[in-house]
Amino acid sequence: MTLPPARLDAYREALRAYGLTPGQPYRVLAVLTTGLPGEAIEVAVLREDGSAFVRRAFPSVEVEVGAARVHGLDRSGLLGEAPLAEWREALLAELRGFTVRAWAAAFALQALNAALAAGGAEPIQGTVTGVQDLLERAYPDEPRPALRAVCLQLQVPVPDGRSALGTAQATRAVVDALLS
């Protein structure tokens, strides 16, 4: 799918109108889930320097077949992992006090909080800027922009859906390319 240059210009303007500027440090949050909606089973936080916090979590529910086909994870493959509630504080340390962006922020936060609730832990509070939501503002009557399509148009690496880190890296590449 090719996006028209005018659409990319509108996307750039949507990011700038929200206050995103080149060179601004930020972290990127991404998750893989048990399904739609579902619990987070892999979480990645891409730091400003390119290093990453990546952890997997044992879910309280089965992984839906469709989700497993995309990312290759199932509940039996996560048996040795701790539930997300057990490493909530480590995740919060990665997010607290930082500007955080995610491709689909509402989806990521819902999945994180579903996994935390399953473990009896408090939900994550705070603001995560949804990049997809900002781009959608440029064309509210059109389908939501897909990360893959925007990556292809901008000629940045396309995530394969098999890792939260790959999605985080693609999100950063899109934001940085649009703001350059």
Image (tube, helix red, strand yellow):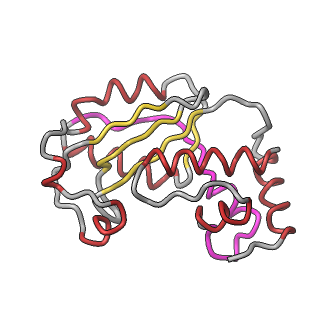
Q: Quadrant of the C terminus?
A: top right
Relative to residue 86, is residue 177 drawn left or right? right
Magenta-colored segment: predominant secondary structure: loop
Q: Residue at x 51, y 29 (%)?
A: 51
Is 15 located above or below residue 24 in the figure? below
Residue 65 placed where, x, y %?
Answer: 24, 71
Relative to residue 63, is residue 36 drawn left or right? right
Report which quarter residue 38 is drawn in. Answer: bottom left
Residue 150 placed where, x, y %?
Answer: 67, 63
> Residue 130: within the magenta?
yes
Q: How many marks?
A: 0
Q: Residue at x 24, y 67 (%)?
A: 64
Residue 45 placed where, x, y %?
Answer: 47, 36
Q: Nearer the viewer, residue 159 or 175?
A: 159
Q: Quadrant of the N terminus?
A: bottom right
> Residue 122: within the magenta?
yes
Is 97 located above or below residue 166 in the figure? above
Q: Nearer the viewer, residue 99 or 164?
A: 164
Relative to residue 117, is residue 160 drawn left or right? right
Relative to residue 20, is residue 130 drawn left or right? left
Is 157 located above or below residue 36 in the figure? above
Report which quarter residue 93 is drawn in. Answer: top left
Residue range of the region highlighted in magenta in the rendering: 121-145
Q: Residue at x 41, y 51 (%)?
A: 163
Q: Residue at x 43, y 47 (%)?
A: 109
